[in-house]
Amino acid sequence: MYISHETPSQTNARLGQVIASAEFVVHDQPYAFVETDACHFPQALLEEALAFVRDEGVWSALVPSSNPEHEQFVVFSFHFATGLDNSGFVGWLASHLKATVGTGVLVVCGQNSQRGGIFDYWGAPLSVAGQVVAEIRKLRGDTSNT
């Protein structure tokens, strides 16, 4: 992890380059969290879950969901280009999406050394999926709809 000493405009420029250079994927189906008692790892969800997080009481798995009774999210991911300082990216993009779309986000980070290091799965409420994805594409300088 890098420690940067820069002005806010330098941070915006650096992270603008980071988002433009990142591999950005929007997942086709909605996702939701399902909970399982912490005493029993949800082995059956291994193939479909993007992430597992545990606290004292539950395992929480982020899985594809078509169940409208669950809070559903659009999920998108970033794999960052090797060699770019992506420190501060989560706070920068989360703050930007809150200011422009009005939404909070969920973020789960992982590490894949063979693909540039840190990667992020992000989620936003399904009700603002189009706005969130359009705003990210705008930040990336991508005017296509793919």
Image (tube, rainbow, N blue to C red):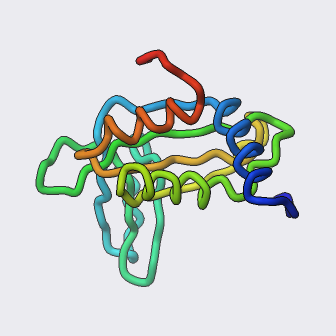
Rendered-image quadrant of the C terminus: top left
Q: What residue lies at 49% left-to-right and 19% top-to-bottom?
A: 143
Q: What residue lies at 39% left-to-right and 41% top-to-bottom?
A: 132
Q: What residue lies at 77% left-to-right and 38% top-to-bottom?
A: 116
Q: Nearer the viewer, residue 145 or 25?
A: 145
Q: Is residue 16 left or right of residue 45?
A: right
Q: Nearer the viewer, residue 76 or 70?
A: 76
- Residue 81, image quadrant: top right
Residue 96 in the image: above or below residue 18: below
- Residue 13, image quadrant: top right
Q: Is residue 105 left or right of residue 84?
A: left
Rendered-image quadrant of the N terminus: bottom right
Horizontal and vertical percent position of residue 68? 12, 49
Horizontal and vertical percent position of residue 99? 44, 57
Residue 137 in the image: above or below residue 35: above
Horizontal and vertical percent position of residue 36? 31, 68
Q: What residue lies at 79% left-to-right and 51% top-to-bottom?
A: 10
Q: Residue furthest bottom?
A: 56
- Residue 39, image quadrant: bottom left
Q: Residue furthest left?
A: 69
Horizontal and vertical percent position of residue 73? 31, 48
